[in-house]
Amino acid sequence: KNQVEQSPQSLIILEGKNCTLQCNYTVSPFSNLRWYKQDTGRGPVSLTIMTFSENTKSNGRYTATLDADTKQSSLHITASQLSDSASYICVVSLNTGGFKTIFGAGTRLFVKA
Amino acid sequence: KAGVTQTPRYLIKTRGQQVTLSCSPISGHRSVSWYQQTPGQGLQFLFEYFSETQRNKGNFPGRFSGRQFSNSRSEMNVSTLELGDSALYLCASSSGVDYTEAFFGQGTRLTVV
């Protein structure tokens, strides 16, 4: 069964600290993995996209890693800011005909001053 | 380049009524996907339209339907509304060919009373 599981479900950190969010997937055939940031009440915004051959991808203070062998990905946030408070969603796309994607439930991050 | 536009942003309906939501994708994008997001369930895939044809469908009842026009704009219709249909409805626009990037609209917040 194609699934995407994220952990932790929620996380509270102090401003300026680093954190790492996890995403494990059992999706086949794998096409790509994306991390999205979603502010409350708004649409998700893409942070990174990685294909099978990519191990790491950065976008400012956000760095995503992908281990296609273990089917794990992580999103590392450096020097967190209050504006990083949001839900972070891991999305895995299947390499089949059509736009088939599996969404994780997300990790809710709270950054406190 | 204009982003994905969803209308209306907010909607309040009564149980039993029907509702139509609209999504205008990014110019040149031929794929529009619809998602339902509730606090308890996260993002759930409804269906995807590509070149006016439904290409993928999620596990939602027949009360949820959609269509896509020749200009790629898409509408989603929910008939016989139930309280549980209250959610944020998001649409995502992509080229539909390479599956590498999907851009989300701001969503329509539907409240069923």
Image (spheres, coloured by chain):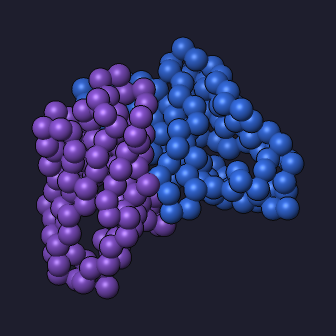
Q: Position of residue A60 (x, y in %)?
A: 71, 32
- Quarter of the figure with the N terminus of chain B: top left
Q: Residue at x 47, y 52 (%)?
A: A43
Chain in blue in the render? A
Extreme-front residue of the structure:
B1
Closer-to-camera residue (A70/A61): A61
Relative side of A4 to B4, left or right: right
Q: Position of residue B40 (x, y in %)?
A: 47, 66
Colour assignment, chain B: purple
Q: As displayed, is residue B51 above or below residue B46?
A: above
Q: Residue at x 61, y 33 (%)?
A: A73
Place residue B16 in its image quadrant.
bottom left
Place residue B88 in its image quadrant.
bottom left
Closer-to-camera residue (B30/A104): B30
- Quarter of the figure with the C terminus of chain B: bottom left
Callout count:
0
Residue A13 in view of the camera: yes
Closer-to-camera residue (A40/A23): A40
Q: As displayed, is residue A12 above or below residue B97?
A: below
Relative side of B113 to A64, left or right: left
Residue A101 in view of the camera: no
Relative side of A71 to B24, left or right: right
Closer-to-camera residue (B22/A94): B22
Q: As displayed, is residue B86 above or below residue A13?
A: below
Extreme-top residue of the structure:
A53
Relative side of A33 to B7, left or right: right
Q: Position of residue A32 (x, y in %)?
A: 46, 26
Q: Residue at x 25, y 60 (%)?
A: B21
Q: Residue at x 37, y 45 (%)?
A: B4
Place residue B84 in its image quadrant.
bottom left
